[in-house]
Image (spheres, helix red, strand yellow):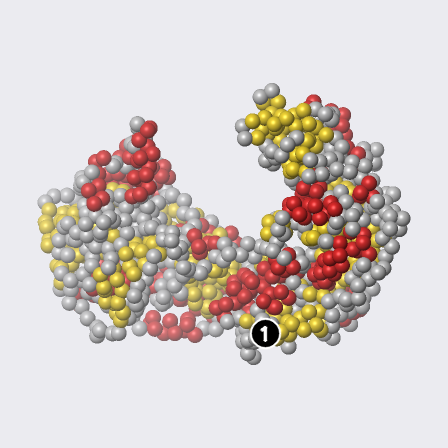
Amino acid sequence: MPEQSEGCQFSFDGRTIEAETGQTIAAALHNARQHVLSRSFKYHRPRGLFCMSGRCPNCLCTVNGEPNVRICMQTAEPNMRVESQNRWPSLRFDVLSVLDRLHRLMPVGFYYKMMHKPRFLWPMFEKVIRRIAGLGRIDRENGHQGRYDKLNMFTDVAVVGGGWVGLHAALEAADAGVSVTLIDDQPALGGHLRHDPDLAGENVADLLAKVMSHPKINVVDSAVVFGCYEQNYLAIQRGQRMIRLRAEQVVVATGGWDRPLVFENNDLPGNLLAGGAQRLMHLDRCSLDGTVVVVTDNAQGYRTALQLAKVGTNVAVIVEIHDTPSADAENISVLTGQTVVAARGRNHVSAAVIESVSGGSQQTIPCRWIVQAVGFTPSTSLLYQSGCTLKYDPQFDQQRVESYAAGTHSAGAVNGTHDLQACALEGRRAGWAAAAALKPAESSRDDQPAELTSALSPRAAGHYASSSPAKKKFVCLCEDVTEKDIYDAIDEGYANIETLKRYSTISMGPCQGKMCQATAIALCARKNGRTIAETGTTTARPPEQPLPLGVLVGRAVRFNLVRRSPMHSWHANAGASFMDAGAWKRPERYRNPDHEYHAVRNRVGLVDVSTLGKIELRGPDVVEFLEFVYPNRFAKLKTGRVRYGVICDEAGILLDDGTIARLEDERFFLTATTGNADAIDGWFRWWLTLKPQLDVQLTNVTSCYAAMNIAGPHSRDVLDKLCDADLTTAAMPYLAAQQFEVAGVKAIVLRIGFVGELGFEIHVPSQYGLHVWRAMMDAGKDYGIKPFGVEAQRRLRLDKKHILAGHDTDALTNPLEADLPWIVKLDKTDFIGRWSLERVKRRGPLNRLVGFRIEGNRVPDEAALVIHNGKLSGRVTSARYSPVAGAVVGLAWVPIEESSNGDTIQIRLDGQLLPAVVQDEPFYDPDGKRLKE
Amino acid sequence: MMTGATPIAAGPLIHVHRRCGATIEVVDGWELAVRYPTEPGVGENAIVDMSHQSVHEVSGASTGEVLQSLCGVDVPIRSVHTAEQRQVYRPTDTRGLIFGDVTLPGAIDVTGGWSSVALFGPDARTVLNKISGLDLRDETLPPSHCCQGPVFGVNTLFGRLEDQYQLHACPDVLEFLWEVILDAGAEFNLKPAGLN
């Protein structure tokens, strides 16, 4: 054991544990003889360290309130609070471990067959299942304290995997002059070489030094590439950060991991993968107390056994699956042609039962650890995701690339290459190929690293599971799926690997198949009497490794796009409550919308309409364009006049409404509904592209102008104080559009009104919006001016039966049925939607948007149903109480046969039917005198 | 009759600066944050509100000729020409934007439609990489070049000058953009600085 270095303390289920500096939590617990770390998902069996590389589910714990942390990868820090999961009341004594004895009642797919009869018991079963299902608990009180964010990166070549192969690939590509990003999931480069020091010797240090100092290589460590998307867009998790890496070329050098052996009680604490044992030894400086049995079919098992023996561990025997030893065992006994068929023990391995591979008598060897080195599962997920096709190669006993996706290369163990020299060459060739793809003119075949000419001896076919009829032979550690479960599921008809996966849930747990998929495929093949190649695989999808949702969302939860008008700060200081209008924040009310309403009707009010879409059209052909995109006429719109218009699509459906002002002979100023500016801009540009012969210049000036509408009997008086213009009706009649200074600022002033009072809409450059607004409020003090918000505005406009596009209209609304037949000029040459509107007119309208009036003060909800003879016949779109009408007024869609003036319709409210009378004329100032005075 | 108050222009961040205790002065008709209580030092990461600039737009088939006559040199597509206290951007073949005072027949004054911030410091690019998926590397956006792209959904015009990145967007989203940039720059100690 090395010298004790300065460390720290943390707690595990309330027990204080010492950890050395840099040691993982798992290693510290191992040193403290805490070998049971969790309880399994279904049977609540004790589980302990297994892979020590963040892939199996055995060491998932809650750390400082964060659930499902793989403590074999988490460095211990002072005062950490580590808690085991999935146990009650404690890890040592878990009540639900009784389920292990009731496994006969919980066969594969049992939840599809049980607990839903009798039906009345299901709610009870559901509560119980919810309580015991799942892994880890979310701290709902404190929430997550993390800060997630994102980072975008770009590189010429991305090398995924910083082991022996990846290092060579990165160096070769960088030496060729391209930028390289080398990503590895460990805190230091080297891959397996870090925990298997006998592999490459001193060469590694030189190689590492070259890579770390190379100016063209950017190393991203402790980072997991969890997804490969189109065009080599790699999604990477690094702690709480998601890195989006866009690479021109990708080299996959992800290697793989040890494959578990399936035998009875192979999930007991004390079972370790060889790599896990090596990591404990060489990275965490831990030893294995007691006797070790190594079961293997390859040289790694022998290396592991010898390394264990070197540090003083008692290695009782190497159980060699092949008939001859795979390597030199030196002084350690080797039993050939044998395999482990069972582990004995209660909460920890106490013995290994071995048997000949071909069957026969058994031998029990007392031990505390069973180290497994029986094969290798390549990490091919990213290759699949990138679009490569792979095929099972029985000579290599793994999936291997058959064809590469564009821009993708692979090398090393992921290809089935394990010889160190061959791996280095493969890595260099892949790096060279990636660089050459980017610099073909500068690369020559002579530069390409030579191919290894000596024949490689691929690994023999693997040994997946011992042949014994025992029940507790776990294939999937995450979901507690046994070999028997797999065979039973196949017997039930789920013989296809995809349906087997879904029915048994194998490979659907935290490991996502890393520990179990290869074995599951082999067992499925064996049971079906087919080959592994014929059995196929399931589909690999991101994320390759589970990750918190926060990593995907980043800071987006906190930052939703917000658009604010230039006067926003004034509204906020005035106590406005804001509402969302698309991304815009609009004042809904200041204090009391009733007061705001009355201020407009009786004195003067000011509303911020900066959110309106605004478009400028200039050029000699603007009129022709307007005639085409609007169903109404513009040829005779004079300079200095403004007109209301609607925009329809080819089906005659109303897209938007707004105003069109002719400021100069070839300059028009258009407005559109809040939030629709970009859509209308796009719509106009689309049609201008289709009509290149039109000389029209379009500029979206939505944000260029702040806009406000002053309305009320005294609006002219207020505006008069701020300008020199003649605002009398003679000089500026209703629907006039003029340009003059307001409060010293050049303004576009339209005499229009949405709320039914004398009013002016003022557009000024947005940098002066606050100045003009303040000037208006100041000038209006003597007249009792009030700012009014959207709520008051909606009440006011409803008095006049003015529609809100997108609120009173929908994707089926045409202007003929929206009570705007006067706007459609079918005698024009052509316009968008003409053909469809002609058909509507010929057919006659089927529905109509009507105004209605309800005596009393019961206001139906918007979208309240209109009922006729007990059946749904329409819906309310807007409704408010109107003080000036002394009744509830609103707009509703009704069938044409119920839409005549004076007709009574029935509106459902709180289960009752409310009679409402259809009214054609506006509820207030029907002749528009107040508007036009 | 007209009130006598001289119009004062204000950018969309003025109330943010005021709230943070910045010294506000009126310069050339604009309310500006000239100094922050704690300013970043030389060589540190800083963000400055540049929303007080005039902005004019040139568009159409003759954009190239118009910009060339203004600048005296050809202004290639996606480039930024800097001279005489102004930057001339040409993001596309038929569109040019001039930030800074200019008198140019045919150009439309779109000052109200643009607001700008400038990012300085050794980590400016990394800060932008946290909030935008644009490739801002030297080979794709060298100095004196520009590009357009989204930042948290905001369509933004990026300009790379020798010592700074400029971001231009609609004024109604600039406060949002400012918050996003400061949040991303927090780990690099990014601080707002006044115009002084």
- The amino acid type of the residue labelled 1 equals Tyr
Q: Nearer the viewer, residue A300 or B77?
A: B77
Residue sitting at 56 percent across and 57 percent down? Answer: B152
Task: Point out residue B78 in the picture as x, y percentages from the top left corner.
Answer: 67, 64
Task: Point out residue A587 in the picture as x, y percentages from the top left corner.
Answer: 63, 51
**Where is A874 relative to A655, above or below?**
above
Residue sitting at 58 percent across and 64 percent down? Answer: B178
Quadrant showing the C terminus of chain B? bottom right
Is residue A56 shown left or right of residue A440?
A: left
Residue sitting at 10 percent across and 45 percent down? Answer: A361
Is residue A807 shown left or right of residue A340?
A: right
Q: Nearer the viewer, residue A424 or A490?
A: A490
Q: Nearer the viewer, residue A436 or A34?
A: A34
Task: Point out residue A867 in the picture as x, y percentages from the top left corner.
Answer: 60, 25
In the displayed image of the protein, which residue is found farthest to the top?
A869
Q: Quadrant of residue A201?
A: bottom left
Decide if residue A716 is in sight here: yes
Residue sitting at 66 percent across and 49 percent down? Answer: A789
Is residue A525 shown left or right of residue A409?
A: left
Which residue is label 1 attached to? Answer: B36
Label 1 crowd (10 A; few <14 / some 14-19 / many >=20) = many
